[in-house]
Amino acid sequence: MALMDFIKKQFIDILQWTEEGDGTLAWRYPMQDMEIQTGATLVVRESQMAIFVNEGQVADVFGPGTYKLTTQTLPVLTYLKNWDKLFQSPFKSDVYFFSTRQQVDQKWGTPQPITIRDKDFGAVRLRAFGNYAYRVADPKLLHTEISGTRASYGVADLDGQLRGLVLQNISNAIAASGVAFLDLAANQQMFADALARELQPAFAKIGLKLEAMTVQNLSLPEELQKVLDQKIGMGMVGGDMGKFMQYQTAQAIPKFAEGAGGGGVAGDAMGLGAGVALGQVLAQNLQAGLQGGGAPAAAAAPVGVRPDEVMATLEKLADLKSKGILTQEEFDAKKAELLKKLV
């Protein structure tokens, strides 16, 4: 019976993986009824690595190249099997090949809105999606932690776990970046970079290297999107609050005129006049208040400001404060200054 078993055995002279098709990360060389000849050739192509596993324990690891398998090229396996340096017999060992090519265009996204915490806005719910690319960097670690003894392990097998890692680390990325959420949301590349920095250690723990991360879309609640749009608008005028208020006033004049005139040419003229006056008050008073000077503001304010104009200005300032554009201190200082005009 032992003789028949010996006759049935096949002896491997060349170990290689042609890697047909895409999407395979790890592949086990079929070893049933086969043994490896001492002096056999191991071929590891570019974008591949190979490992020898003896009774469940990872032994030798090979990068790209062509190797003659001897006790010199298999030092760990030689030690585990207690071979001497003249060992010449065929032997059995599990051999796994790994693809180290970049696995590109891997999708990630938030199936449902996720809640993150922000220092400025508290809890924020957002949806986002994008893609990323990675490669196998440590086949020994991937084998012991993820792929194991399976005959083949593919990109699709790992997809769900990697998507989960991305979603799990979005909040951590925002917190670790130290950048206000609105700044990240206004710059998707900055957001992607912060997320990649947070994910690198998590990928490395399972033998992978994150090569690229993109954020293709970021959806915010409507209220927060309006604040973001205003922040972008301020950036367009160089962060000058006075210019920003002039722009906001110009946008508001037509609506103000519609409500103030009551119809007809005379009404339109009254509405437009009131809108222009309010625009001057808003732009001049807010700009002076943010510069911190009470006297210049008094000099800039038009003579004979009516109570309804002051109240309208206060309402506008309160709206800006609620949206985070003005601080509480700035609002309080300007409120006190405007209320003096009613005395």
Image: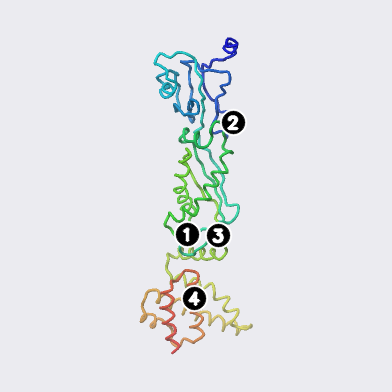
Number of the front mark, 1 or 3: 3
Which residue is farthest top?
3
Distance (Cα) linking label 2 and label 3:
40 Å
Mark linked to residue 318:
4
The residue shown at (58%, 18%) is 33
Mark 2 highlights which residue?
21
Q: CA distance from mark 1 to mark 4?
A: 22 Å
Q: How many marks?
A: 4
Q: Position of residue 342 (x, y in %)?
A: 45, 88
Does residue 21 appear left or right of residue 66 in this picture?
A: right
Label 2 vs label 3, nearer the camera: 3
C-alpha gap between disc 1 and disc 3: 12 Å
Which comes before the other along the chain, label 2 or label 3? 2
Q: Secondary structure at mark 4?
A: helix
User: Is disc 1 surrounded by few (<14), some (14 to 19) or many (20+) residues within 10 Å?
Assistant: many
Nearest to N terminus: mark 4 or mark 2: 2
Residue 85, quarter of picture:
top left
Of marks 4 and 3, which one's residue comes earlier in the chain? 3
Other residues around mark 4 within 10 Å, as few (<14) / some (14–19) / many (≥20): some
Of residue 286 and residue 161, the one placed in the foreground of this image is: 161
Residue pointed to by mark 3: 125
Dot 1 or dot 2, earlier in sequence: 2
Residue at x 45% of width, y 24% of height: 65
The x and y percentages for residue 20 are 58, 28
Q: In front: mark 4 or mark 3? A: 3
Placement of 54 over or under 307, stated as above or below: above
Q: Which residue is mark 1?
A: 181
Whether residue 62 is visible, yes or no, is no
Residue 57 in the image, given as x and y percentages of width and height: 47, 29
Mark number for residue 32?
none
